Amino acid sequence: MTNSIELIIEPRLRDLGGFSVRRALPDVRRHMIGPFIFFDQMGPAEFAPGKGIDVRPHPHINLATVTYLFEGEILHRDSLGYVQPIRPGAVNWMTAGRGIVHSERSSPESRRAAQKLHGIQSWVALPAEAEEREPCFVHHPADSLPVLDQPGLRMRVIAGSAFGATSPVEVFSPMFYVDAHLAAGSELEVPVVYSERGLYVVDGSITAGGDPLAAGQLAVLRSGDSATLRAAVDAHVMLFGGEPLGKRFIWWNFVSSRRERIEEAKDAWRSGKFAAVPGEDEFIPLPED
């Protein structure tokens, strides 16, 4: 490999009951890229009429979840009382802080016909001073996010700052998250602004500093080195990263800088001390250690 790429990660394919995800982070060789500690490609999946996803209520602590769709719809409900559908190009940003519970389902309306679902779900660790903040949920529609158009290139800044634009999504540490579409023959220089940068190829293929990357691969870019992305065919790429936050522990849906905090969260979920999601009677039990 050239100096542009430090590591290429092949995501692990997981079947969540008829719904497949490709999990790129955490990886045994690289747990985090900037504050990003979890990175899943959901689908693409197709559901027959009457079918859909049903992720029952489950808890999070000390992180923010970011749901971003390319196709389809997911209905978010949480223990703060928010009910919000997420659609392509929009952002659901849920800051768990000291603790929150949410569910993710296909809505009754979307189940009336055949539907597709495709997108990225990621988790962003919070800096230590913000880990126990009050939980909150914010929705940003697609038209509220900056879109940068250049010949052969279209980018939406999902969160943080990049390419001279800043998303309205509130973040708690220096980071960037960009949805980029490159037309065949186009190039994109990934700025050397943040210490840790990664890219994930959703569709198509590219080269980064001359190294080929195919759909479904995550590349960790070498710190301090510039990287030029080139697309021989139309390509869809997610760019993300930021400044490192230090070691984080991750277990099930819990992320924290303190191992003992995860043990506390386990006990709290096991004993029913988390707030419930209004209108939801189901929940995902705590897994066996």
Image (cartoon, rainbow, N blue to C red):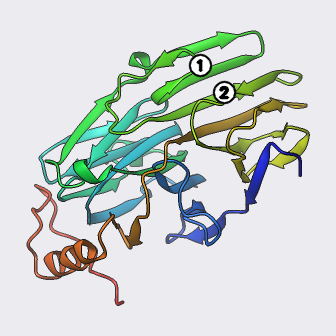
170 sits left or right of 34 in the view: left
Q: Amino acid at mark 2?
A: Pro
Tell me if residue 196 comes above or below residue 141 in the rendering: below
Q: Residue at x 81, y 30 (%)?
A: 228
Q: Quadrant of residue 25?
A: bottom right
Instruction: Please name the residue shown 91% across and 31% down the image.
Output: 232
Residue 182 in sight in this render: no
Of labels 2 and 1, the one closer to you = 2
> What secondary structure is marked by label 2?
loop
Q: State how far apart marks 2 and 1 are (Cα).
A: 7 Å
Q: Position of residue 27 (x, y in %)?
A: 60, 67
> What's the residue at 50%, 39% (across, down)?
69
Label 2 with label 1: CB-CB less than 8 Å = yes
Q: Which residue is located at x 76 percent, y 24 percent?
A: 188
The residue labelled by disc 1 is: 163
Crowd tier of the residue under label 2, counting other residues whose Cα lies within 10 Å: few below 14, some 14–19, many 20 or above: some
Residue position marked by numbered label 2 in the rendering = 191
Vertical side of 117 occupied by 246: above or below: below
Q: Position of residue 52 (x, y in %)?
A: 44, 56
